Image (cartoon, coloured by chain):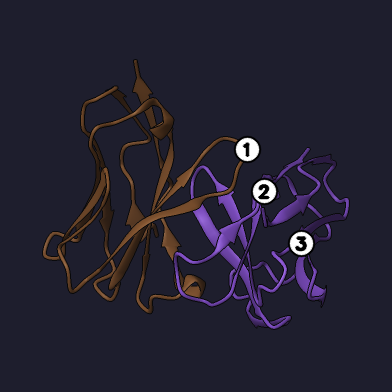
Amino acid sequence: DARVTQTPRDKVTEMGQEVTMRCQPILGHNTVFWYRQTMMQGLELLAYFRNRAPLDDSGMPKDRFSAEMPDATLATLKIQPSEPRDSAVYFCASGLSSLAGTEFFGPGTRLTVL
Amino acid sequence: DQQVKQNSPSLSVQEGRISILNCDYTNSMFDYFLWYKKYPAEGPTFLISISSIKDKNEDGRFTVFLNKSAKHLSLHIVPSQPGDSAVYFCAASDTGTASKLTFGTGTRLQVTL
């Protein structure tokens, strides 16, 4: 049963600390997305990779967020320094194409910044 | 500026009855619309979609209706079942690609016995 996995599932940290969230896409998937879910905005796309190359990260606050794919089995999203307004659930999704509705979401990382 | 709006944060429906979830959009360039379902502690899963060339798409108990002139779509679930209790997100795209999806804030559906 192929699934997208995300770690950690929950993270509580203090303002100013670095946060790293990890995602393991489904094996063979070449498209990876990072989303953020907040009550006010719903789901927002932060970054999008194809074949490990970043194609769009216009949704990310550039000064503090960074997203990478060190290899095909790992995607990371870093926040440095973290702020209380970053508190949200962060989802990773992977797929074989960029066609909407074909992506598979991971269970998310719930981030709380105090 | 919320381009996709789900004005009802929550909805409660009795088992066996029809659930109707609504979604409005403001961007006239959107031409592909989707609904996702999300259970607690899980990621969203794709449910059903509709292209702007259609006004209805059906998949089992789920039907999506699109009214382009009103910039409105709705998801009908008939009959509603307790397992349908979840948060439903409406999403829209002007390219059909996941990289250009705009999501609503979600509606929590509770199907009661």
Cα distance, mark 2 to mark 1? Answer: 7 Å
Disc 3 on helix, strand or loop?
strand
Q: Position of residue B65 (x, y in %)?
A: 18, 55
Q: Chain of mark 3?
A: A
Q: Quadrant of residue A81?
A: bottom right
Cα distance, mark 3 to mark 1? Answer: 17 Å
Nearer to me, A58 or B22: B22
Which residue position is annotated with label 3? A24
Question: Identity of the amino acid at label 1?
Answer: Ala
**Residue at left offset 43%, top offset 30%:** B83
Say yes or no: labels 2 and 3 on the same chain. yes
Mark 2 or mark 3, whichever is nearer to me: 3
Q: Chain of mark 2?
A: A
**Chain B, chosen colour in render:** brown
Question: Identity of the amino acid at label 2?
Answer: Gly
Cα distance, mark 2 to mark 3? Answer: 12 Å
Which residue position is annotated with label 1? B41
Nearer to me, B41 or A14: B41
Nearer to me, A78 or A6: A6
**Chain A, chosen colour in render:** purple
Which residue position is annotated with label 2? A108
Contact between labelled residues 1 and 2, with CB atoms less than 8 Å apart: yes
Q: Relative to A65, is B41 on the left or the right?
A: left
Q: Is residue B112 above or below residue A5?
A: above
Question: Identity of the amino acid at label 3?
Answer: Gln
**Residue at left offset 76%, top offset 61%:** A24
Q: Residues within 10 Å of mark 2 (few under 14, many from 20)?
A: many
Query: Where is the C terminus of chain A found, in terms of image quarters?
Result: top right
Q: Position of residue A36 (x, y in %)?
A: 61, 55
Q: Relative to A4, is B21 on the left or the right?
A: left
Q: Residues within 10 Å of mark 1 (few under 14, many from 20)?
A: few
Q: Relative to A74, is A41 on the left or the right?
A: left
